[in-house]
Image (cartoon, rainbow, N blue to C red):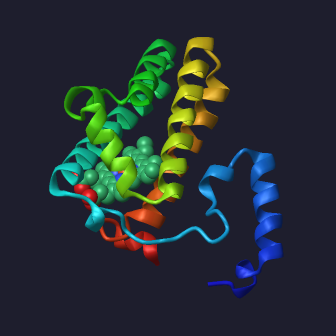
Amino acid sequence: MQRYERTGRTRLLAATIAGTLGLAVALPAVGEEMSPVSPDLTPKLRDLLRQEMQSIEQASKDILSALIAGDDARVADLAQQIHDSFILQQSMTPEDKQDLMAAVPENFVARDKAFHRLSADLAQAGRDGDRGAQHAEFGRMIEACTACHARYATDRFPMLAE
Ligand code: HEC
């Protein structure tokens, strides 16, 4: 671990550079807590969250296949499905979703929102047939998965804590 990264000024600089590159979502907010959210959830909410995670992982893999085939419409469709959280509509009632959001820290909710914005941007890039933008947005989306896991899911993904 490099010590200098912990100073406020270096963080600010890093955030500015990353912001310029459009990577802000992958960086921790200053003072952002880093502890697993899963133990704070009811068994039902935990199951629903895991189901949602499994379906967005499957959709992300399918997006990769569509990207390498140049299938813009399928990229748009899958990214839109992630954005609309198909699983939420199938098994999470609006009340479940509210309960989940109430049980997790504010920064987790912010990361979830930022993640959903990225999926909307990816869907738009698909509809525009802009492949360069699709690759960039897909990369940002995967960074957002990892960044959230590194902060809130190290119980499930312990290697991210290293
Ligand atoms: C806003 C935070 C957040 C984002 C963004 C996020 N995840 Fe997760 N993810 C979690 C948490 C928290 C868990 C741990 C759930 C648990 O163990 O109960 C998790 C768990 C998982 C799991 C394991 C599910 C299981 O059955 O144990 C997978 C797979 C996964 N995420 C995939 C993804 C992928 C792929 C993305 C991006 C496309 C993503 N996640 C984005 C928070 C997030």
Q: Position of residue 6 (x, y in %)?
A: 70, 80
Left or right for 91, reference 19? left
* 129 w.r.t. 160: above or below: above
Depth check: give the residue in front, 85 or 93: 93
- Farthest bottom residue in view: 3
* Residue at position x 20%, y 57% in the image: 42
Which residue is at the front of the view, 47 or 146?
Answer: 47
The front one of 82 and 135 is 82
Write the residue at 43% across / 24% down.
66
Question: At which x and y percent is residue 38?
Answer: 29, 62
Q: Does residue 145 appear left or right of residue 58 in this picture?
A: right
Q: How many marks?
A: 0
Q: Position of residue 122 (x, y in %)?
A: 56, 27
- On screen, residue 26 versus residue 19, left or right, reads left
Coordinates of residue 83 in the picture (x, y in percent): 45, 29
Determine the image quadrant of residue 1: bottom right
